[in-house]
Image (cartoon, rainbow, N blue to C red):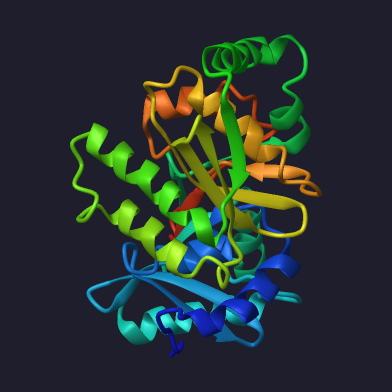
Amino acid sequence: MLDFKTPVLDDLAYIRKICENYGTMGCDFNTANIYIWRNKYNIKICIFDGFLVLAYFRDGKPWGYCFPIGEGDPTAVVAEIFKDAKHRQIEANFVMLTSAQKQKLVEITGYKFSFKELLGDEDYIYRNYDLSILPGKRFHAKRNHISKFNRTYPKWSFVCIKKENKRDALKVAEKWCKSRDINPHTNEEYKAIEETFENYEQLKMHGGILYVEDEPVAMTMGCEINKKTFDVIFEKALVEYDGVYAKVNNEFVKTLVGFEFINREEDMGIESLRQAKLSYHPVVILKRYSGVKNDKAENI
């Protein structure tokens, strides 16, 4: 049986090395995300034969296994996942599969699977150049939003998050919650932001704060998935400042020098969020699937 455990801070360096070498662009294998959301989603990890196996647990058992990531042939690890499920007397339900992993699962097992697209879980991935430069007619509206913000609030500034100003970033998140009648002290996302700040350096986070005069009006932060791809995990802004989201997005991406791609994560099935993400013209929409062995399935 696979020896799953809840990830701790001391696990992150090794996990990060596996994820970076694997080269995935998906936010589920952003090391910080694995740690930050370990409690909300009951994420557990196992290292087997040099591969990272991530699983989501419910009632003490995995309800969803992720495809193992690592260097080399994953065939033996996938076989071990099926053994683990059999030992626990559950179905080996694979989740958060990319199209490539879905095909690989069929190829290395020889099994038939029933696959289902996980709508709302797809990652929206953009070119750094597009988000920082906003070139051409496609981004005309975004440039207008930013120009209006600059005219309306000429005394704006953008600074990277440091130890001295973390409280200002948290202040934005708190105001964002209260503007939506959310109690920040019971809200899981707010608590995740608090914990992220507590372990900011160990999680290798990078973020920024947008100010109007001396008042923080937006915050954003994330971390690298690998040397090419940066993942924006949190972004909160006070919408009474017209154009604030376009502005903080643009200013933050300008600090992400060296990254070719920016992952802005999923739309969670929220139509307004989907439209907002599409308006920035992603170069990749990384679709996700679940899959379970089914000898009667036609779609292999």
Q: Quadrant of residue 104?
A: bottom right
Q: Quadrant of residue 186?
A: bottom left
Rendered location of residue 149, percent (x, y):
55, 17
Q: Give the residue at the far right of this rendering.
A: 258
- Residue toward you, 108 or 203: 203
Rendered location of residue 75, percent (x, y):
65, 76
Task: Kindly identify the residue that appears in the image at 38 percent across and 41 percent down.
Answer: 172
- Residue 104, compared with residue 270, is above or below; it is below
Rendered location of residue 189, percent (x, y):
33, 52
Q: Quadrant of residue 40?
A: bottom left
- Residue toward you, 198 or 155: 155
- Residue toward you, 99 or 89: 99
Task: Kindly identify the residue that appears in the image at 57 percent across and 27 percent down.
Answer: 156
- Residue 169, compared with residue 34, is above or below; it is above
Position of residue 250 in the picture relative to residue 298 (left or right): right
Position of residue 48 in the picture relative to residue 178 (left or right): right
- Residue 134, compared with residue 40, is above or below; it is above
Q: Is residue 224 visible?
A: yes
Rendered location of residue 300, percent (x, y):
56, 52
